Image: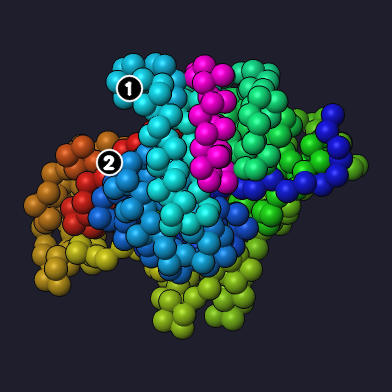
Amino acid sequence: MESKKKERVLVFDTTLRDGEQSPGASMNPEEKLRVARQLERLGVDIIEAGFPIASEGDFLSVRQIAREVRGPQIAGLARANLNDIDRAWEAIKEAAHPRIHTFISTSDIHLKYQLKKTRDQVLKDACAAVAHACAYTSNVEFSPMDATRSDWDYLCDVIEAVIAVGATTVNIPDTVGYIMPEEFGKLIAYLFKKVKNIKKAIVSVHCHNDLGLAVANSLAAVKNGARQVECTINGIGERAGNAAMEEVVMSLATRKDFFGFSTGIKTEYIYQSSRLLTHITGIPVQPNKAIVGANAFAHESGIHQDGLIKEKITYEIMTPQSVGISGTHLVLGKHSGRHAISERLKRMGFKLSADEMKRVFVRFKEIADVKKEIFDEDLEAIMYEEVYRVEEKYKLVYLNVVCGNVAIPTATMEMEVDGKIVRDAGFGVGPVDATVAAIRKITKTDYHLQKYAVNAITGGTDAQGEVTVQLQFNSRSVVGRGADPDVIVASAKAYINALNRLEFLKRDVKKVKVVE
């Protein structure tokens, strides 16, 4: 076992780059900036803000984050070619702490079938890329893509060469989630043994979760010398996703006796960060997800409950409060004042302008007139409905639905379209189908509905319904969300929100996907 001296493990968050490559997880620049600011609040060391050469939209988003988020290092991804690196530097050069992250494949599989290059050619390309990046900044990271399926000795040659020309971080990606924890630990140890200049760089790891081992592999690497872990909030990413940041961080925090390492993460912001990402992307967290799942701190077994009543440590290895989950519910109602709501929102991490607070308070009163108790989750839903919403081409003004077992479901609707009031009606097999039909007639759209999901935000029959819809536009898709005590109204809001997001998407340049 390693020395118990507390060493720092750097947290490299790639939610905005690899995480955004999850199907349906595309974010607009405002949403990316909001996530970046939350990552700064969370205390991550490095934010990989995007892949600047992929599109003009991605470039502008990375540049905005570099200009406005000043605490963490801001990294831009670039393939091992000069144009990519130039574009990445142009995007991040105004950052307080810029980093260029360049990569090329090293596995024989990728060399033969994808790159169609020899090992010598790839070695030269890697060194040339790192050297070019070093002309801009001394903070250069290099990744040999598909490292875990590469020949170990060739991998050592490449790593030694890129460090020699200036790479200060070398990242070892398990690109396809293939390796086992014991193997990965041995690989990292092998690099430290065989690469002569390895101590001149920080060794990083980037693990994918295809076999459900991304976190285990990352931790095995840390035990064997890695001092940077690349991860994402909620583990989102390509295919089965990446190592989940919250699981890596809380493993190190909970088992300090085993690892002896610390991170700079303010763990009390973990749950808030998870919820923010879920609201923006529409990708839900499974209830039994470690750390941030709805059941992560829920106990139903009588034996467990008995033990918890007597002493919490009998069945809880960490407290809910340590990751930002309140042990008690805040209950607000129609008699609550603006100050009480404002203070609670501050404690939840939301900072509002006077105008934003006014809109939130009006919506709060509307909901409080319908349901007796307003919980934190209700406040969250109000925030994302009233404050964090995209520019609206379409707005819901009025909705009336008639349905029942002896009536044809009919939705009569009034909407504002580009500032003009439009009225129409729709029929369907049920109230939601009729509502969607009316929206489609008014907006003259007919996008494919890929997903429709309803969840109760809190318990009780008077709970707000939270609806998520996913619409497809060509090869892209967007997620819309809406919340209301009336689930039909929530459905209309979600569908209209998705249409507004599609309007934004049409103005964006199509992005190029890259797998690491």
Q: Quadrant of residue 72?
A: bottom right
Q: Which residue is mark 1?
A: 117
Horizontal and vertical percent for residue 395? 23, 64
Q: At numbered mark 2, what does the secondary structure look like: helix, strand or loop?
A: loop
Q: Residues within 10 Å of mark 2 (few under 14, many from 20)?
A: few
Q: Nearer the viewer, residue 203 or 500?
A: 203
Q: Label 2 is placed on what type of residue?
A: Val
Q: Nearer the viewer, residue 86 or 259?
A: 86
Amino acid type at circle 1 is Lys
Percent position (x, y) of residue 410? Answer: 18, 48
Q: Decide: is 332 above or below 338.
A: above
- Residue under the image location 17 percent in, 67 percent down: 416
Question: How far across and down, in percent of the image, does residue 199 sit?
Answer: 68, 39
Which badge, 2 or 1, comes first in the chain's sequence?
Answer: 1
Residue appearing at x 34%, y 16% in the figure: 112
- Residue span colored magenta: 149-173
Residue toward you, 315 or 323: 323
- For marks 2 and 1, give the CA distance: 22 Å
Q: Are marks 2 and 1 in contact (CB under 8 Å)?
A: no
**With 45 as the anchor, is 317 left or right in this view?**
right
* Vertical arrangement, residue 437 with respect to residue 356, above or below: above
Say which element carries label 1. Answer: loop
Instruction: Locate residue 221, reporting x and y percent.
Output: 67, 30
Tell me which residue sits at (74%, 32%) in the image.
223
Could you tell me which residue is drawn at 65 percent across and 63 percent down? 330
Task: Return the residue at label 2.
Answer: 512
| In the image, residue 135 lies in the stretch drawn in magenta | no
* Image quadrant assignment for residue 122: top left
Which of the two residues, 337 or 98, is positioned nearer the viewer here?
98
